[in-house]
């Protein structure tokens, strides 16, 4: 081998290590910092950054997990990936190395092996620090959830009764309210927003709210779900506006990891029915009670993304429907459950919705050998609660049998 060839190979090795070092530097960046630099307008709640999707817009459909850097759009567009480089690629429509250059600037001309090893160690240390910070944030959020739950103790539940009746869940259909529900007559709706160039906590609304306990696998409260309502509004929903844009009437506080809203839990059950929201799941409980029998639990999954867990990327497929088993977030059922039924609402894009539910079902079946999974659609263009609400359309066949 000539000295010229050796020199060329050495130069190529140095260039490759320089590129790898730049990539390590980019991966070491905090996804919070990168999202802020991209001016995505996201707010942090319960370990997630949420806000408008950089691809398809909306208000709060885009979500970033601050623990592992995974992100996705609830509407199922191509805005999904993991880590700060992927986030820059999606937001600025760049290829991988173009995104690295955007984040890093000029790449170094050469880097030694020792320098590359040092960059890798720095990235590992940064990831450990972020994980510790995320855990501290999680514990603080859980503490806040307990505070809300405690304040709601002892409040009269008639307003919650009246709200659920507006959703078709009358006392005749639902004789007893779930014990995981409470009420606050004057709860503040608070989110972070940019005001005069600075992100501040903004109180957008105050009013009555239904408070639901979200429980982890061990049964302990780790989060609360808050549903604001207005008994004079359509379907009991209040008008919550920020700068002319309507906000969702639901927020969570705490840690949702592997958790659920345990609405109806018999002493003994081997079948678990889960819808995305409280109203949908309670509708299943009243509509399917006779068909499924008494030994069935009905739990709300909080969100479609939480029911699904993280989905694997498959080249050439937009939605793989396959779970990323390395990710420990997302819901999975108790080990004694033998049948898991997911309710599929029909008022969202059906392709990503079904793929996410399939992902969650497959995850649960891998974690629980012998489990049988099933997805029951509510009907095109409606969620299950629409079928019993006072202004409901014609009934659709949604028999889970």
Image (cartoon, grey):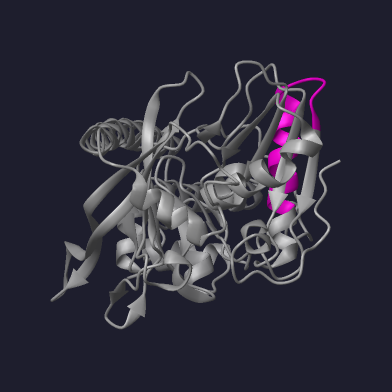
Query: What span is colored magenta in the figure?
Result: 355-372
For image coordinates 70% across by 49% down, the residue present is 343
Quarter of the picture holding the C terminus: top right
Q: Residue at x 21, y 70 (%)?
A: 194
Decide: is 360 above or below 35: above
Count of numbered tags: 0
Q: Quadrant of residue 127?
A: top left
Relative image position of residue 282 (x, y in whole percent) = 59, 45
Residue 364, compared with residue 358, is above or below; it is above
State whether residue 355 appears in this view: yes
Question: Residue at (41%, 67%) from the top-left corner?
Answer: 237
Mainly helix, strand or loop, the magenta region?
helix
Give the quadrant of residue 211.
Answer: top left
Q: Quadrant of the N terminus?
A: top right
Q: Nearer the viewer, residue 181 or 59?
A: 181
Instruction: Measuring from the top left, give residue 355's x and y in whole percent.
Output: 74, 53
Q: Nearer the viewer, residue 39 or 100?
A: 39
Instruction: Pick the residue in front: 124 or 238.
Output: 238
Q: Is residue 288 left or right of residue 266?
A: right
Left or right, 247 with respect to 335, comes to left
Residue reaching furthest right?
A: 401
Is 55 situated above or below 185? below
The x, y position of residue 254, in whole percent, is: 34, 38
In percent of width and height, residue 78 lies at 62, 67
Q: Is residue 85 visible?
A: no
- The answer to if 56 sits in the magenta stretch is no
């Amino acid at each position: 081998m000539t000295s010229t060839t050796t020199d060329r190979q050495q130069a190529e090795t140095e260039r490759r290590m320089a590129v790898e070092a730049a990539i390590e530097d980019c991966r070491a960046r905090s996804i919070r910092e990168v999202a802020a630099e991209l001016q995505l307008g996201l707010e942090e709640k319960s370990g997630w950054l949420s806000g408008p999707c950089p691809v398809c817009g909306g208000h709060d459909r885009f979500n970033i997990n601050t623990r592992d850097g995974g992100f996705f759009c609830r509407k199922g567009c191509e805005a999904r990936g993991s880590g700060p480089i992927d986030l820059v690629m999606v937001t600025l429509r760049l290829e991988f190395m173009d995104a690295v250059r955007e984040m890093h600037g000029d790449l170094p001309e050469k880097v030694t092996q020792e320098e590359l090893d040092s960059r890798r160690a720095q990235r590992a240390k940064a990831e450990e620090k972020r994980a510790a910070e995320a855990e501290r944030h999680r514990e603080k959020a859980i503490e806040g959830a307990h505070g809300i739950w405690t304040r709601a103790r002892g409040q009269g539940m008639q307003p919650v009764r009246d709200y659920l009746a507006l959703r078709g869940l009358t006392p005749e259909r639902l004789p007893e309210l779930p014990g995981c529900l409470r009420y606050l007559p004057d709860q503040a709706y608070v989110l972070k927003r940019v005001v005069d160039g600075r992100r501040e906590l903004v109180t957008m609304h105050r009013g009555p709210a239904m408070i639901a306990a979200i429980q982890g696998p061990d049964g302990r409260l780790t989060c609360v779900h808050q549903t604001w309502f207005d008994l004079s509004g359509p379907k009991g929903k209040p008008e919550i506006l920020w700068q002319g844009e309507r906000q969702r009437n639901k927020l969570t506080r705490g840690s949702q990891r592997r958790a659920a809203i345990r609405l109806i839990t018999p002493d003994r059950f081997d079948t678990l029915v889960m819808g995305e929201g409280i109203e949908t799941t309670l509708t299943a409980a009243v509509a399917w009670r006779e068909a499924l029998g008494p030994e069935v639990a009905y739990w709300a999954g909080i969100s479609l993304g939480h029911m699904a867990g993280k989905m694997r990327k498959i080249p050439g497929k937009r939605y793989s429907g396959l779970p990323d088993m390395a990710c420990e977030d997302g819901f999975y059922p108790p080990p004694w459950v033998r049948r898991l039924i997911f309710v599929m609402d029909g008022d969202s894009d059906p392709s990503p919705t079904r793929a996410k539910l399939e992902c969650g079902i497959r995850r649960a079946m891998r974690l629980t050998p012998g489990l049988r999974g099933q997805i029951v659609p509510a009907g095109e263009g409606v969620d299950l609660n629409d079928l019993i609400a006072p202004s409901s359309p014609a009934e659709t066949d949604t028999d889970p049998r």
